[in-house]
Image: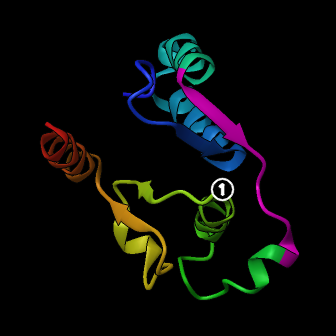
Amino acid sequence: MAEITLIEALASEQVIGEVEGNLQAKMSRAMPAFRMLVQRCLQVVPDPTSEAMLEHEGRAHEKDLPILVAAVREQCPWLITFNVNDYKPGHPEIVVLRPGDFVQEVRYLLGRMG
């Protein structure tokens, strides 16, 4: 969706690092394809500062809090993850969705346009 500019996709440096680490450990041959997708489809944003994270403490699992805070800072309406339970209670301005649920949401929104 981001490649065809239907959505603007952002990922923090932490997210990119986690994906690269997982790919290196489990599917290293997929790394070039992943890096191409990042370059073509994602805006990579910096991780938040420690100070920025303080005001959001307790809104997500400790290791995932920087991802939530980056999404808040970038004013993302959605945070897409398979680990939705790691983002509870979350932030009132961000809806945390699994990828399939996000696709359904986009389909719904596109349907309302036509």
The percent position of residue 37, horizontal first and vertical second, equals 52, 19
Q: Nearer the viewer, residue 73 or 83?
A: 73
3 is higher (above) or lower (below) than 92: above
Residue at figure coordinates x 78%, y 48% from the top left: 46
Q: State the quadrant of the N terminus.
A: top left
Residue at figure coordinates x 58%, y 24% from the top left: 38
66 is higher (above) or lower (below) than 105: below
Disc 1 is placed on an element classified as loop
Say which residue label 1 marks.
Answer: 74
Q: State the quadrant of the C terminus.
A: top left
101 horizontally vs 25: left or right: left
16 is higher (above) or lower (below) than 28: below
The percent position of residue 30, horizontal first and vertical second, equals 47, 16
Count of all numbered marks drawn on residues in the image: 1
Residue 50 is covered by the magenta coloring: yes
57 horizontally vs 96: left or right: right
Amino acid identity at mark 1? Glu
Q: Residues within 10 Å of mark 1 (few under 14, many from 20)?
A: few
Question: What colour-coding does the image apply?
Answer: rainbow
Residue at figure coordinates x 69%, y 63% from the top left: 73
Q: Nearer the viewer, residue 99 or 9?
A: 9
The percent position of residue 67, horizontal first and vertical second, equals 61, 60
Quarter of the view holding residue 17: top right
Residue 104 is covered by the magenta coloring: no
34 horizontally vs 21: left or right: left
Residue at figure coordinates x 85%, y 66% from the top left: 49
The percent position of residue 87, horizontal first and vertical second, equals 46, 73
Start-end of magenta stretch:
41-51
Q: Nearer the viewer, residue 98 or 103?
A: 103
